[in-house]
Image (cartoon, grey):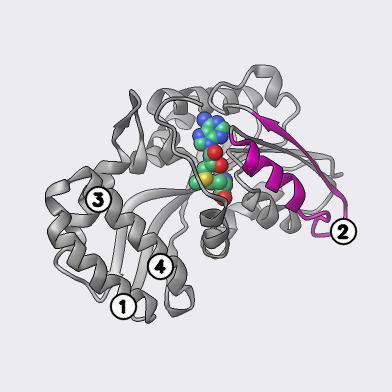
């Protein structure tokens, strides 16, 4: 595994899947659908697939036969993905899949030959600028639409607000942009960097908001997100620890009681060849 890579637990991916599904920008799916082969036979690559959340969401929303090629460097997540993609498209056509354990920032030209669509979800913020440049180059070489969803923007809103929110958010964003194992992560700069890179390669780029809107029904996810948000902020700025401990206790009580509303802003991006 590459030094400084961020490992993701299946439990966290399961916890966030419904919020991700509710957040995704629907109108980009319509744009994707009209660009897929009209007679079916779409080959869809999901990069950094995790347990396959994107396929579970997107495959049943597209018509026609689909073959999904799922890639992730984490074998355990891949094996879960292989077991859990839906078998049917929107019109009942079959959905098949294959999996590849590999680094999606080091794809060879042959890896994406014949792709009809490339997707990735919640991937860009954990890679570096060089890795993003290689990823965009691979997608552009493939010459098909690329849908990159749920990239954090760095903006969160908490209701009711608290004077410490802004300080925790700033420290968290700095943590997202940290250098780890010699790799400087893009964090909230990733979606903008991807848009620029695709535009420079002559692609049309659509960017749409895809915020998590977490209310009382999402209290367990809000609490888990909040705990991780504060821990990361304190790792980055240890001087926040004393104030943040009391803050976290207060906010977690509110979250668990369904009294804390959180909006975590993301962007979905669709790049299409002209
Ligand atoms: C936050 S998870 C998102 C997973 C999934 N796309 C989803 O939306 O649920 C990020 C995923 O990207 C994978 N990943 C990160 N960097 C990668 C790389 N360079 N090559 C392959 N997979 C990578 C991780 O193993 C993880 O499964």
CA distance for labels 2 and 1: 44 Å
Earlier residue among tags 3 and 2: 2
Q: Dot 2 corresponds to which residue? A: 92
What's the CA distance linking mark 4 and mark 3?
A: 16 Å
Nearer the viewer's eye, disc 3 or disc 2?
3
- The reply to whether dot 4 and dot 2 touch (C-beta < 8 Å) is no
Q: Which residue is mark 3?
A: 233
Choose between 5 and 166: the one closer to the eye.
Answer: 5
Rendered image quadrant of residue 101: top right
Dot 2 or dot 1: first in sequence order is: 2
Any magenta on residue 98? yes
For mark 2, give the secondary structure: loop
Height in image: 259 above or below 122? below
Quadrant of the rendering where the C terminus is positioned: top right
Q: Tell whether circle 3 marks a residue whose Cβ is less than 8 angstroms from ligand 1.
A: no
**Of helix, strand and loop, which one carries label 1?**
helix
**Number of other residues with Cα within 10 Å of mark 1, as a class: few under 14, some 14 to 19, many 20 or more:** some
The location of residue 199, given as percent across then percent down, is: 46, 31
**Cα distance between the residues tagged 4 and 2:** 35 Å
**How far apart are the alpha carbons under marks 1 and 3?**
19 Å
Q: Which residue is mark 4?
A: 222
| Residue 103 seen by the camera | yes
Q: Secondary structure at mark 3?
A: helix
């Amino acid at each position: 595994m590459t030094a400084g890579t961020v490992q993701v637990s299946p439990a966290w991916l399961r916890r966030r899947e419904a919020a991700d599904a509710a957040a995704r920008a629907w109108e980009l799916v319509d744009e994707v659908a009209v660009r897929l082969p009209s007679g079916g036979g779409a080959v869809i690559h999901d990069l950094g697939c995790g347990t396959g959340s994107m396929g579970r969401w997107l495959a049943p929303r597209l018509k026609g036969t689909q073959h999904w090629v799922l890639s992730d460097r984490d074998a355990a997540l891949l094996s879960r993905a292989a077991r859990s993609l839906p078998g049917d498209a929107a019109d009942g056509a079959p959905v098949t899949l294959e999996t590849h354990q590999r680094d999606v920032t080091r794809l060879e030209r042959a890896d994406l030959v014949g792709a009809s669509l490339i997707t990735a979800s919640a991937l860009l913020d954990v890679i570096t600028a060089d890795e993003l440049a290689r990823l965009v180059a691979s997608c552009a070489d493939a010459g098909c639409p690329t849908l990159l969803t749920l990239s954090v923007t760095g903006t969160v809103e908490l209701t009711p607000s608290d004077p410490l929110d802004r300080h925790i958010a700033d420290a968290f964003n700095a943590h997202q942009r940290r250098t780890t194992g010699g790799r400087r992560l893009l964090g909230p700069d990733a979606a903008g960097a991807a848009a620029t890179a695709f535009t420079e390669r002559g692609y049309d780029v659509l960017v749409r908001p895809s915020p998590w809107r977490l209310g009382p029904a999402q209290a367990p996810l809000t609490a888990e997100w909040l705990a991780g948000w504060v821990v990361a902020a304190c790792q980055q700025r240890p001087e926040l620890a004393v104030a943040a401990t009391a803050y976290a206790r207060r906010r977690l009580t509110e979250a668990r009681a369904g009294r804390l509303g959180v909006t975590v802003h993301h962007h979905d991006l669709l790049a299409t060849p002209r």
